[in-house]
Amino acid sequence: MPSTWIVAEDDEDIRNLIAVLFQSWGYQALTFESGARVWEWLDTVETGEYGGPLPEFALLDIRMPGKRGNEVAERIRTVEAMQHMPIVLMTAFALNADQKDNMLSNGVDQIINKPLPDFDKLHQILHDVIHNKLN
C-alpha cells in the first residue's frame, strides 16, 4: 500500500492538481479543503475513530478557511503518532522574517511560495524535506 500524504488547500483546482501529482509520484493523497476539515480529522485520529493509514507527510496552505496551515501544523505536532511527520507550508502571500521564523520554530519544516515550482522541482523539494526530517 502506498504511503499517504496530506494536502490541505482551499483552492479546488490546486488541491486536485497536487493530489494527482502525489498519486503520480506513488503516494495516496488525503485531501482537505480547509484547515477546519483537517482539524476535525485530527480529532478522529486522536479519539481512535480514524481507521485508515496515518499520513507520512503534509503539504498545507497557510491561508485557509477555519484554521490556518501553521495552526494545523502545530496541532499535528501534538498528535503522538504524527508529531515527527514532515510538514511543508505553501503560500501565495509574502511573509516577513518574523512570521517565517515563528512558523518554522513551531513545527513547520519548510515554507514554499506559490505559484509552486515545476513538478520535478516540487518533487525534489518535498523529497529533500522528508529525507532531512527522517534521517
Image (cartoon, rainbow, N blue to C red):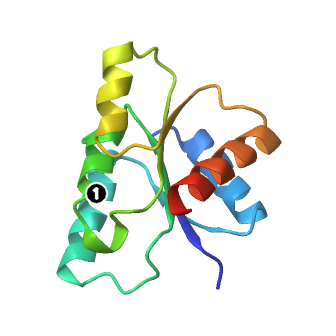
Work out whether residue 130 or residue 4 is closer to the camera in this orientation and state it. Answer: 130
Residue 36 x, y percent position in the rendering: 27, 50
- Locate the N terminus by quadrant: bottom right
Image height of 93 relative to 21, above or below: above
Residue drawn at x 33%, y 48% is: 73
Residue drawn at x 43%, y 83% is: 52
Residue 41 x, y percent position in the rendering: 30, 66
How many numbered tags mark residues here?
1
Image height of 116 relative to 135, above or below: above
Left or right: 3, with 102 as reference point = right
Q: Which residue is mark 1?
A: 77
Circle 1 Cα neighbour tier, 10 Å, few/some/many (<14 / 14–19 / ≥20)? some
- Locate the C terminus by quadrant: bottom right
Residue 80 x, y percent position in the rendering: 26, 71
Which kind of residue does numbered mark 1 sit on?
Answer: Arg
Residue 121 lies in quadrant: top right
Residue drawn at x 37%, y 31% is: 63
Residue 81 x, y percent position in the rendering: 33, 74
Looking at the rendered structure, the secondary structure element under dot 1 is loop
Residue drawn at x 39%, y 43% is: 108
Work out whether residue 108 or residue 14 is closer to the camera in this orientation and state it. Answer: 108
